Image: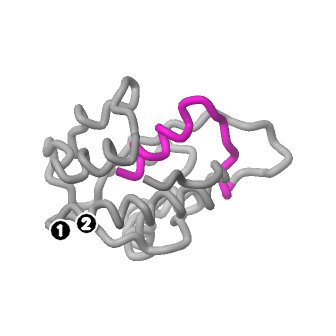
Amino acid sequence: MAAALLNDKMRTREVCSAMGDEASPLKPVFATSAGLWAEVGAPITALAAAALAEAGVAAVPPNDYTAHRARLVSEELMTEADEVVAITGAHAMELMMRFPQHAAKITTLGVDIPDPYGGDATRYRACLEMLCYAISRHFGVGECDEG
């Protein structure tokens, strides 16, 4: 949900991340998603897709989250990334242990976001709201819409 939300916010904007130099020109952002313990090939859950749709996040290319399939974090993905934003501090630490050569680009949103997997629609909506505010703060993309 985090990548889809950030990409939706960025459709018409460019931002500097919290890791960037404030004096540098703004750079386009496109987020992708990969997990430490992902079930490779699994689609987005129906509840996650519903929460995104209810929040007005458009499932349009190149951000068609309905076509998303889970994948594992890899050396190739870590190398290609300018910034790696972990959803929890524990995930950030695990990434640093697995990919110490990329530790300088690993960060968090500043707050641990609980995984809604296995929860109900309310849990997914709450997770999306937390993600929205954390992403807005981290990437400087403004306020979240009330849905």
User: Is residue 81 shown in magenta?
Assistant: no
For image coordinates 45% across by 60% down, the residue present is: 131
Placement of 74 over or under 120, stated as above or below: above
Which of 133 and 114 lies nearest the eye of the viewer?
A: 133
Tag 2 and tag 1, C-beta contact below 8 Å? yes
Residue 52 locus on image (x, y percent):
33, 46
Q: Amino acid at mark 1?
A: Gly
Question: Mark 1 = which residue?
Answer: 119
Question: Mark 2 = which residue?
Answer: 122
- Gap in angstroms between the C-alphas marked 2 and 1: 8 Å
Q: Which residues are magenta?
A: 1-19
For image coordinates 50% across by 43% down, the residue present is: 81
Placement of 99 over or under 94, stated as above or below: above
| Residue 82 occupies quadrant | top right
Residue 121 locus on image (x, y percent):
21, 61
Horizontal arrangement in the rendering, residue 102 relative to residue 4 (left or right)? right
For image coordinates 53% across by 63% down, the residue present is: 134
Determine the secondary structure under disc 2.
Answer: helix
Q: Is residue 80 visible?
A: no
